Amino acid sequence: MNRAKSFMADTVLGTIGGIFNLMPDSILFGSILLYFLTQNLSYGVFTIFIFEITLAHKLTSFIYTQTATEKGNEPKMDCRVGYKTPRFAPDRIFSKDQRPSYRVFSISAIGSYLALAINSFSDALSAMSEQYGSDWIGRRVVAYTFIIMIVAGCIVFNMVDNCNTKTDVVIAAIFGIITGIFGFSINNSIFGKESINFLGLPYIFSKESEGSPIYICAATP
């Protein structure tokens, strides 16, 4: 029994915690690598979005720390998010403030960004389901489910790891979602719909709504 508990605590929970601790730096480097390998615009814009998250969190952290009355926990090495160096803890890709939780802030923003990107191609998924008979709409539901599970898991992990107060976590999740919505709207407006097309789906346009003529070709005898 004790061995099973030790396995759960050290192996399972430790692995999950390690994955969450590396976010969002691991997502950033993965996006950069995928962009150079595939030259897919959506991964390049997604990389820019992660930098936007960092700037948005710094602004949120400055406002929050100036107005918060609840004192946060002292930052520990285990509580620092992203990649860490054993000898020089401050020597990191980004220097992140801890209040509100940067981990929850970034994952909530990324989750809302990806959910909105998938939702933008709902018409294409519906048309593909009708055309090919495959349940493409079901795949969208699966994607939403995994996004919610990852974001919720990150929130729960941060509430029990004694690195952030519950208020910090809730505030980070709310403003992270808001950041994801704004970031999605801005990037979609600047770079176009191809910048959010992670799955390489076709576009569905309505010629009637755009005022374009519809040509009907008669069959030749």
Image: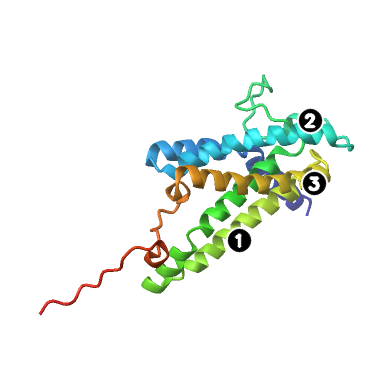
Query: Dot 3 surroundings within 10 Å: few (below 14), some, or many (20 or more)?
Result: few
Q: How many numbered markers are drawn?
A: 3
User: 119 above or below 216?
Assistant: above
**At x 40% / y 36%, what residue is drawn?**
36
Q: Nearer the viewer, residue 30 or 112?
A: 112
Q: Earlier in the sequence, mark 3 or mark 2?
A: 2
Disc 1 secondary structure class: helix
Give the Cα distance between marks 3 and 2. 15 Å
Amino acid residing under circle 3: Val
**At x 52% / y 36%, what residue is drawn?**
48
In the picture as drawn, the residue positioned furthest to the top comes out as: 88
Quadrant for the N terminus in the image: bottom right
Q: Position of residue 45 (x, y in %)?
A: 49, 40
Q: Name the residue carrying label 1.
A: 145
Quadrant for the C terminus in the image: bottom left
Mark sitting on residue 160: 3
158 lies left or right of 204: right
Q: Position of residue 198 (x, y in %)?
A: 46, 50
* Residue 73 in sight: no
Q: Name the residue carrying label 2.
A: 75
Give the Cα distance between marks 3 and 1. 23 Å
In the picture as drawn, the residue positioned furthest to the bottom comes out as: 221
